[in-house]
Image (cartoon, helix red, strand yellow):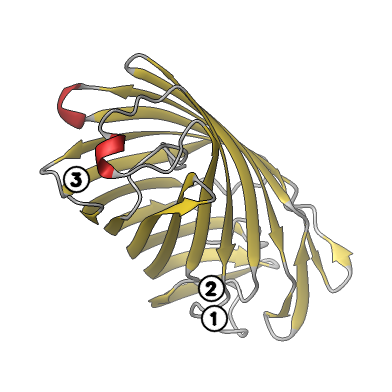
Amino acid sequence: MEPRSYSNAPVGLNFLVAGYGETRGGLAFDSSVPLTNPQLTTSSTLLAYGRVLDFLGQSAKLTIIVPYSELSGSADYAGEAIRRDVSGFADPVFKLSVNLHGAPALSLREFAAYEQDLIVGASLRVSAPLGQYDDRKAVNLGANRWSFKPEVGISQALGRWTLEGTAAATLFTDNKDFFNGNRRSQDPLYSLEGHVIYSFAAGIWGSLDANYFTGGRTTLDGTQGSDLQQNWRFGATLAFPMTIHHSIKLYGSSGVSARTGNNFDLLGIAWQYRWGAGL
């Protein structure tokens, strides 16, 4: 869940984000892996770079995320208990977000007079199969496949309140070397996401977040699995600036309903450094 996905910022602004998150209880890395009774903990440190762009007169943002993860715990696969302790790089993510209405590309001076009303945007998120992967293991940090997530979203400001909503579909290529040479494919995973954001004084903001996703049924060597996903998650975010260049974000979420039993709890903290655009 990612509040303020569709907002405006001056062109030429750069972001460097370092974050740490910890997931307990289930499968945060690939929720469609056919495991039961997962008791797993994943700790991830990420480094991300983002830049605000002028895309045909509209504001846009390019983001590159590189996560390093540690995973430990146990689960049952095909009736057999397995344990996994591993660390390494997970799959990197590349995302281009473009605002289509309500957030034109602005200089820093122009941005100082900007007031948000209705913003409509779209994005494409691509995950590349470059993370740690061992075909002899059922649980890995990398997915050994590409994924593509097109998304559309709206953001409406109402005084200090901002309401956001997004709809997305994640498309997957096949993993041709899943667990000792099997071929694993997955149907598209559809999601809806909403945020209610409140802006406090001094640039502090908080949000309540909700996410629903469905689909994602897998097929292993031609046999369709009974792993259709229909999951709800709720969370909260609090962000506050330290200086004009530095800010901190705290976030957490928890699964409240999961058809396939892959709920997990997530806690994280991120530090962001901004430069460029005349700051």
Q: Residues within 10 Å of mark 2 (few under 14, many from 20)?
A: many
**Gap in Å between the C-alphas at discs 1 and 3?**
34 Å
Q: Nearer the viewer, residue 77 or 5?
A: 5
**Gap in Å between the C-alphas at discs 3 and 2?**
30 Å
Counting every numbered tag in the picture gives: 3
> Which disc is residue 247 wearing?
3
Q: Nearer the viewer, residue 91 or 51?
A: 51
Q: Position of residue 233 (x, y in %)?
A: 52, 36
**Numbered disc in front, either 1 or 3:** 3
Q: Is disc 1 placed on a helix, strand or loop?
A: loop
In the rendered view, does 10 fall on the left or right side of 27? left
Which residue shows up at 47% across the image and 38% down it? 6
Dot 2 or dot 1, earlier in sequence: 1
Q: Position of residue 16 (x, y in %)?
A: 27, 60
Which residue shows up at 20% across the image and 51% down it? 278
Please report contact status of discs 2 and 1: CB closer than 8 Å, yes or no. yes
> Which disc is residue 142 wearing?
2
Task: Name which residue type carries label 3.
Answer: Ser
Which residue shows up at 71% across the image and 63% down it? 172
Task: Name which residue type carries label 1.
Answer: Tyr
**Numbered disc in front, either 3 or 2:** 3
> Which disc is residue 133 wearing?
1
Q: Is disc 2 placed on a helix, strand or loop?
A: loop
Task: Name which residue type carries label 2.
Answer: Gly
Dot 1 or dot 3, earlier in sequence: 1
Q: Position of residue 96 (x, y in %)?
A: 52, 56
Q: Residues within 10 Å of mark 1 (few under 14, many from 20)?
A: many
Instruction: Say whether residue 141 is visible.
Output: yes
Dot 3 or dot 2, earlier in sequence: 2
